[in-house]
Structure formats: C-alpha cells, structure tokens
Amino acid sequence: MATEQWFVEPILPGGTGEKLPQDDMEPGAQPCGDPSWSAPSSRPGDPAQVEPEDVQGQLPKASPSTPSPEPLAPGPGPGPTPPRLPLDTLFSPITEQLRYLLKKADDFQSYLLYSRDRVQKEQLAKAMPTFLKMCEPYFLYLEAAARSVPPIYGALQELVRKGLLEISQQLTLRLEQLVLMYASFGFVELEETDPLSISCFFCGRFSISPSHEVSIFRYCAPAAYTTSRFPRYLYKKMRWNLETTPDPSSRGQDSHVDYYFLCYRDTWEDTGKSPANSCPQIQKLWSIGRWVPLGPAEDDLYSWILCPQPSGDYQQLLTIGFEEPSHMLATDLLVQILTGQAGPARSLSAAGPTAWDTQGS
C-alpha cells in the first residue's frame, strides 16, 4: 500500500505540498467494521500490511501469540543481566508512528475544510476506509503488546501497558472525530444497514488465553442495538468479538464467536420525559452486555436466507453508571468480566470519580 503522495494539490491556502492519494483511492473499498460483524481479514502477522515508509524506525510487529523481539525484563538464567531499554527509547518508534497517522488525519480534515473542489472531497471520502485500514496494524500492535497474556514486558508491563493503551485511545478518538466530520458534510454514511457505510471501525485485537482472542470495534456514533430497535431505547457504542478456538486435541468442536457490547439505555426516552425536564448527567445508563441470538436456528440455512436481519436480545452483565467509560476503561471492564474479576450487574457509579481513574490505570 502506498503511503506517500496523498494529495494532488495543496490542502491549505498557503499550500503544504502534499498530494491526494492515487493508489490508495478505492471507490469500492469496504469499511473495516461492517454490519455483518466480521472481523478484518488481516492478522497481526499478515505480511500484506506494510508500515509507512517515511517513519524513522520501523514499528515492531507483534501478535497476541508472538512476544516482542526485545522484552524489557529478561527471564531467569545464568549470565549477566542485560540492561533494560529506557521507556523513551522503547516508545520512540511508537510515538513517531502515532504522529505520522495523526498528521494524515489532520490532512484529511484540512482538505475537507479548506478545499472548494467537491469532486476531490468525494474522492478523499472514498479513501477513508483505506486510511482506517492503514491504521489496523498499528492498533494490532498496541493492543496485543499491552493486553495479551502472558505479558511481554516483565516488570515494566504495567507502565508500558498504560502508555500503549493511552496511545491507542488517542488515535481511536481522533479517527472517530474525523469520520463524524466527513459524515456531517454528507460525504460518509454512518447507517449500519448501508454496506458502504463506516458505522464502526476496527481498534485492535488481543488474546486473554491461548484459545480466546478479543477484537475491538468502535461505533462512530451511537447506533440502535438492532435495526428493529429491540430492545427499546438501547444504543451501542462499542463491540467486542470474542473468538474461541477449540483445542487441537478436541474433536467435533468448531471455533465460534460471541459478541459483547458497550451500550447505554436512554432513560428519559424510556420514561417518556423530555430532555428539558431531565438532568443531562442521568439520561444515559451505561452497561456492558452480551448478544443473545433469538433466531434463526444455526442449522436452518433457508431461514437465514430469508431473514433480513438476525434478531437478538441483550444480556446485561455489568452496570457501569451514568458516566460513559473511556475507550480504554471499557475494554478493561470487559476483560474483568471475561476473566471472572467482575460480578454480574455490578455498579461502578457509586464508587465515585476516583474509581474511574483507578480502573483505567
């Protein structure tokens, strides 16, 4: 994938010299998070993903099952202990890659705001899925290096983990802002039922055990839990795909995927009150829950063909409160649920603001 020559004319009135993408333009490109809920085909070790060529120091590739080539804490063994890498040295190629991607996002935004050529704006909007796809290897590295089990940075794992997840969150929120801006100008669709929309995008993958991997997706704008709007007043903001791979020694078992969501219930809509008569802070009750399929039956192919949209219910697993959790904290809470560290229907709102900082650290 080419990563240079993004713009064919100056973005700002003064000109920056960057050019519109030629090879990266894919009018038929599919968004990385489509309504079919399929995880992206690229894997952490996929050689087809190429890092940008103008970044000083290439980003080390990592996957949930592949440790970093240079762990900071050596394992036990004879011989002298090699020196640890300073954190600044460790994060240097990572932050440089972040600056590169943030600059590209700024270029997309600047061209949208300052260019008068609508045709080229439309071309750039069509390149948006390609740009999001370009960020996937970076998200894969950040989430896998920070969250995958076993930890790969030894004694410094917690410091490294927090730094990597903060970088991942920063890029995620910037991409969400960029997609929403293009949608506000009418160049991008956010409707989940549109196969060419960018309703959500991929934000990384990590493993919690040798047989369980979690993929992260974020919705650019809150979307109804199902197209039939059932359950009522329920809107989703994040989705996690939990892929379970059976042990090779197990026979007759296939891999399967479970879906988990960060949702909020619109309480004023549920009670019939208008927003003007309700406190803004208590209109949305946030929770994490699991998709419960209601049909058709998995072995009924004919019913699947005739079914316009699979129906499902929401099994609430954790009540968070009236404050939206950060992108990083939401995934932390899901991991606690999956590993049995958080009880069902447990509320965090009563713990006060300091509880959020503690959970997110």
Image (cartoon, rainbow, N blue to C red):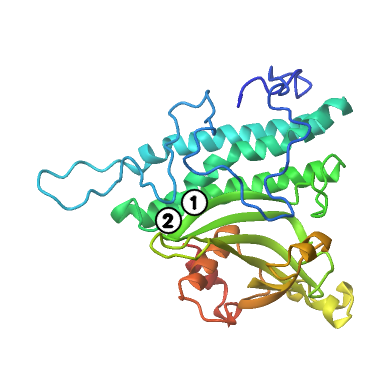
Could you classify mark 2 by the number of other residues whose Cα lies within 10 Å: few (under 14), some (14-19), or many (20 or more)?
A: many
Element carrying mark 1: helix
Q: CA distance from mark 2 to mark 1?
A: 7 Å
Relative to residue 63, is residue 277 drawn left or right? right
| Contact, mark 2 vs mark 1 (Cβ under 8 Å) | yes
Question: Closest to the observer: 252 or 192?
Answer: 252
- Tell me, for residue 143, which label it has, or none: 1
Question: Closest to the observer: 90 or 219?
Answer: 219
Q: Is residue 224 visible?
A: no
Q: Which residue is mark 2?
A: 148
Residue sitting at x 34%, y 51%: 152
Type of the residue with mark 1: Glu
Up-down relation of residue 72 to residue 8 (above or below): below
Q: Position of residue 143 (x, y in %)?
A: 49, 51
Q: Is residue 352 visible?
A: yes
Type of the residue with mark 2: Ser
Quadrant containing the N terminus in the rendered view: top right
Could you classify mark 1 by the number of other residues whose Cα lies within 10 Å: few (under 14), some (14-19), or many (20 or more)?
A: many
Q: Position of residue 272 (x, y in %)?
A: 89, 80
Residue sitting at x 84%, y 39%: 187
Up-down relation of residue 272 to residue 196 (above or below): below
Residue sitting at x 83%, y 46%: 189
Q: Position of residue 203 (x, y in %)?
A: 59, 50
Residue sitting at x 59%, y 55%: 216
